[in-house]
Amino acid sequence: MVMKAYSAEFKADAVALYLSDPSHTFEGIGKDLGVSRETLRNWVRAERKRSGTASAADRPRKPAPAGGVSSESVLEEENRQLKAQIRKLETEREILRRAAKYFGGRDQLVSRFQFVDDHRNTAPVKWLCQILEVSRSGFYRWLAAAPARAERARADEELATRIRGIHDEFDGTYGAPRITAELRDAGIEVNHKRVERVMRANGIVGVHLRKTVRTAVPEPSASPVPDLIRRDFTASAPNTKYVGDITYLPVGDGDFLYLATVLDLNSKRLAGWSIAPHMRTELVTDALRAAAAARGAAGLDGAIFHSDNGAQYVSQNFADVCRELGVTRSRGAVGTSADNAAAESWNATLKRETLQGRKRWNSAGEARTAVFRWITRYNTRRRHSALGQICPIEFEQRSTMMASAA
C-alpha cells in the first residue's frame, strides 16, 4: 500500500477533532478522515508528548477512593485538560495558516525565522519554533546577525545605484561582466557574482542577443579565392588579419541604409567602415580605404582581408583595390555564414545595442548618428570580453607598449 503524506495542518486538525469530544474513538475518527486507527493514535501520542499534556483520556479510570474525589470531579478535570489542549491545537493551527500565507510559496529557512521574529510578541519563541520545525538556537543566531544583514542591504543599495548609473551611461547595453569591469576601474573591488545578484534583484539587464539577417548576395561566377582564415578568428598582432561584411540598417517605412565594415581580428577594432543607401562595390572599397587610412603610413600592406562571397567582394573592382593596398583576399565557402562568423557577430552586436528591440530608426539621419556614436564608443570605451574587458584602442596601445618593451 502506498503511504500517504499528510500536512502538519491536517495532522493538527485530526488531533483536535479527536480530542474535541471524549466519546470519540480512534477507529471512528480514523474512518471519517481516511486514516488508520494506529496512525491517528500515533499523532495523538506525539502531540501529547510534545505538549507535555497528560493523556488522562487514554488511561483506565480508577474508582475513586472512599471519601476521596468523586468520579464527576475526575471527569471535570479531564474535560478541563482536553479543552486546554484543544485551545492550544487551534492556536497552532491558526499559526500554521498564517505561516502558509506569509511564506507565499517561498518556504525557505530564513522565511520561517522571519515569521518567528514577526510573531514572537503573540506567542512564545520556543513554541513557534516547534510548530515551524526550526531550531530555536538557529533563530537566535539569525536574529543576532540582523545588523550585518542590514549593512549588506545598505551596501547593495549603494552598489545598485552605481550599477544603474553605468547601465544608463551605456544606453542599457552593458551586462554584469562589463559593469563589473567599470566598477573595478573606478576603484570598487566587487565580485562579478555580486554584481549579477544585485542586477537581478533590481531588474537591471543588458541587451540580449536576437536573431540576425544575412545580406550577402552570392556571386556564382566568382573566381575562386582560398579561405585563409578557416574559422580561426584570432590574430597574433594588430593589422594582420581582418574580416568584413555588409549589414542593413532599417530606416523609415521599409527603407534601408547599408553598412560595410573592416574589423581587426587581433584588437577587435573597427578600423574602417562606410554607410550608403546602396550596396554597390564602392560601399566595401570605401570601407577598406578608410581602414588603410586609419592605419597610417603602413596602411593595410601585407594584411589578410576575409569576407563572404557577396557580389561586392568578388567583383573585379574590389580585387583591384585590394591589390592596390597590398591586401591578400580570403573568402569562406558559399552559403556558409559560420565562415565569417566574427563579422556577422559584430553586426548583430551593433544593431542589438543601438536599436535595443526597435524594428527600425525613424530616419536615415538618426541611423547614421546612432551608428557613428556607437562605433566611436566601441573603439574608444566599450569593454570587450575577449580583450580582458578593455576597449580595442586601449588593447592596441598596450600591445604596442609591450612590443616596444620587448
Image (cartoon, rainbow, N blue to C red):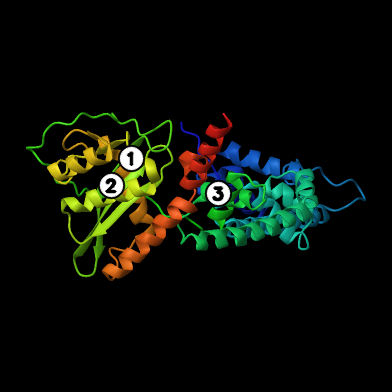
- 10 Å crowding of disc 2: few (<14), some (14-19), many (20+): many
Which structural element holds mark 2? helix
> Left or right of 352: which side holds 184?
right
Assess whether mark 1 and mark 2 are in contact (beta carbons under 8 angstroms): yes
In the rendered image, which quarter contains the C terminus? top right
Q: Which circle marks residue 300 in the picture?
A: 1
Residue 113 in the image, given as x and y percentages of width and height: 70, 51
Quick one: 113 or 346, which is closer to the camera?
A: 346
Which structural element holds mark 1? loop
Q: Amino acid at mark 3?
A: Glu
Q: Is residue 186 visible?
A: yes
Q: Residue visible at 73% across and 49% down?
A: 129
Determine the residue located farthest toward the front in the rendered image.
297
Q: Amino acid at mark 2?
A: Leu
272 to 241, vertically: above or below: below
- 10 Å crowding of disc 1: few (<14), some (14-19), many (20+): many
Inter-mark Cα distance, 3 to 2:
40 Å
Earlier-in-chain disc, 3 versus 1: 3
Q: Residue visible at 67% across and 47% down?
A: 189
Residue denoted by label 3 = 196
Q: Is residue 56 visible?
A: no
Residue denoted by label 2 = 288
Discs 3/2, front: 2
